Image (cartoon, rainbow, N blue to C red):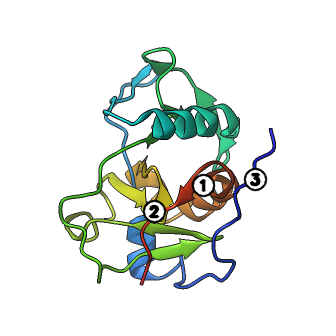
Amino acid sequence: MTHSRRPGPSTVRGVVASAPAAVLLLALAACSGGDDLRIEAHDLSAADRAACEALVADLPDTLGGEARRAVEPAGALGAAWGDPAYVLTCGVPEPSDYEPTAECNVVKGVGWYIPADEQSDPEEDATVLALSRSPYVSLRVPAEHRLTGVDRALSDLAPVLRDDLGPGLDCL
């Protein structure tokens, strides 16, 4: 599928290997192995729903070296990979703690934000948000991938997010 949207900025600000970036490499895994994963639904405009549907259709079969797995409900605006799973949800709301001066890490033209309260413990799952694209996308990263694997996962997602989603918030 080809898309006519222009890619975001090509420069990469921030180093994903840095401490804040490593924290940003977080996510979820509140699921037991082998079970389908539930993707939360959010109220979206018709245009945002269409963008999310295109994104989900274009997501890779592997993310960070992990195979894609089934999610619930069928037709959900998200995807999961691995066990414990990276879990992507499209169309999430702006986080309540986001401020225009918040920092994010840019990986291949996509700015990822991690809430301050999820940055301190690399042994916990965390959620990063692609706020530089719209509609917003969250990625829950299992603790075991926070320090290794997340760079690859965010890099794997960048091209499809740039192609299927419009511009979002600016990153500092």
Tell me how far mark 2 sits from mark 3, CA to CA: 29 Å
- Circle 1 residues within 10 Å: few <14, some 14–19, many ≥20: many
Q: Residues within 10 Å of mark 2 (few under 14, many from 20)?
A: many
Sequence-wise, which precedes: disc 1 or disc 2? 2
How crowded is the residue under tag 3: few (<14 C-alpha within 10 Å), some, or many (20+)? few
* Marks 1 and 3, how far apart at CA: 24 Å
Q: Amino acid at mark 2?
A: Leu
What residue lies at 54% left-to-right and 75% top-to-bottom? 106
Whole-percent x and y of residue 61? 70, 35
Q: Which residue is mark 3?
A: 4
Disc nearest the viewer among 1 and 3: 3
- Depth check, front residue: 159 or 65: 159
Measure the C-alpha gap from mark 1 to mark 2: 9 Å
Q: Compare residues 136 and 117 and report the one nearer the observer.
A: 136
Residue 67 drawn at (x, y percent): 65, 34
Look at 54% across and 83% down and name the residue there.
15
Tell me which numbered mark, 2 or 3, is placed earlier along the sequence.
Answer: 3
Disc 1 or 3, which lies upstream in sequence? 3
Q: Which of labels 2 and 3 is toward the front? A: 3
Q: Residue under circle 1?
A: 153
Q: Is residue 81 visible?
A: no
Q: Which mark is residue 25?
A: 2
Residues under numbered marks 1 and 2 in contact, where contact means CB atoms less than 8 Å apart: yes
Relative to residue 12, is residue 53 depicted above or below?
Answer: above
Q: Quadrant of the N terminus?
A: top right
Q: Nearer the viewer, residue 97 or 21?
A: 97
Secondary structure, mark 1, is helix
